[in-house]
Image (cartoon, rainbow, N blue to C red):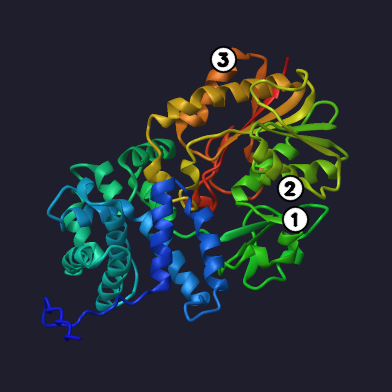
Amino acid sequence: MSEQPRRPRTSGKPYRRPKKDPVRILAFEALRAVDERDAYANLVLPPLLRKARENEGPEKFDARDAALATELVYGTLRWQGTYDAVIATCVDRPLGDVDPPVLDVLSLGAHQLLGTRIPTHAAVSATVELARVVLGDGRAKFVNAVLRKIAQDDLDGWLERVAPPYDEDPEDNLAVVHSHPRWVVSALWDSLGGGRAGIEELLRADNERPEVTLVARPGRATAEELLGEDAAVPGRWSPYAVRLTEGGEPGAIEAVRDGRAGVQDEGSQLVAIALANAPLDGPDRRWLDGCAGPGGKAALLGALAAERGAMLLASEKQPHRAGLVANALDGNPGPYQVIAADGTRPAWRPGSFDRVLVDVPCTGLGALRRRPEARWRRRPGDLEGFAPLQRGLLRTALESVRVGGVVGYATCSPHLAETRAVVADVLKQIPDTDLVDARPLLPGVPELGDGPDVQLWPHLHGTDAMYLALIRRTG
């Protein structure tokens, strides 16, 4: 048999198989899921991390690996706008012509270079290795060239180059420096009422990783019980809140596994507490949560209602979300019922309830700390899509409460088109109503504005930007 000819080498270096980095591969997979499937990182990342931890091979994750993967995913998503501006100056084509998987790898590399303490050489080499694994050698060379350009300056230096001067275009400057779409900057600034210091504090708060906050559901668990967990401290404002200052895994806590406690932002807790404590004229026996999914507020309302011998009806239009509500309320100490029903076409008679909460669907601009991808996914036109539903749900809520009863209109958005504009429009149509001053019902919470409604803020209160208006039926 004749000897087979040797394959000629194409370079002086022998071929080297790329090294697989499980942390960065997982981060890349999470970013691709967010981009391709419009998924949310807070839903995609936990199962990926769980699977990685269960791997018994050499690529098994430890706590440090999970922390790094989480930082890479959330940091890249939060700073996507800024990194896009930097990357755009370092590529030889419009950013829209760069394949999305390549752009994800470049953004991961940019975050390591500009947003972490990872040494420059390690950030570049690890990202190029990732590119070789997930993109191939040819694209890895492109990634290497771009990252070496980015590595020539730090974040402050790049911002000097890519952000327009504040004096020339304040909104565009803030958009690039703080990585928010310009229209979101404008909307948040309008809601705050002006002033550079406030908007910059808010945008910075949106880019900080929020603490995990738990709620001890009354009659089932206590805050004192939860404070026995590692790194647990009391909430700032809610008597039922406990904060996990070092992150932690809520699912590892027995009270959370049992449903006696849950994960719930303190702003959401305050909305439920304020409605429960609003003064009423007459009986206090029947409560309604008209937009109950996925069930966090319903579980707290149900527990508070049980303390007074009141019954809660939790209504949710989507059957699968109604199932989540039923799970959250399972074990509630008092009477309750969960139904799948359209809140704008009520399955109950008018005037049936003493207290009604509608936490309406919205753009979610108040929770950008937790869902950073939402800032890039939302568009100004989304406001028009939500507007009829928000007004319809509030009208139905006011029709569902009896004279003397109270409605709470809540939304996790500070956008004026989703808050005060909705309330003002509906109250013009239903004149026999009065706005209740919600501020005294949030005792100890500072900087609540002129009232009577309340807008919470991440930078002022450490909560999501929840809005609440309380309305009493007078006739």
Badges 1 and 2: C-beta atoms under 8 Å apart? yes
Tell me whether the residue at label 3 lies in contact with that at label 1, contact meaning CB atoms closer than 8 angstroms. no
Element on which disc 2 rests: helix
Q: Is residue 202 visible?
A: no
Q: Residues within 10 Å of mark 3 (few under 14, many from 20)?
A: few
Q: Which residue is drawn at 51% across and 75% down?
A: 61
Disc 3 designates what residue?
428
Image quarter hosting the C terminus: top right
Quick one: 398 or 150, which is closer to the camera? 150
Q: What residue type is disc 3 on?
A: Lys
| First reached walking from the N terminus: tag 3 or tag 1 | 1
Q: Is residue 288 above or below residue 100?
A: above
Query: Looking at the image, which is closer to me, 393 or 420?
Result: 393
Residue identified by numbered label 1: 259
Q: In this view, does 6 lie above or below 348?
A: below
> Does residue 302 appear to the left or right of 204 in the view shown?
right
Q: Name the residue under label 2.
A: 327
Amino acid at dot 1: Gly
Under circle 3, the secondary element is helix
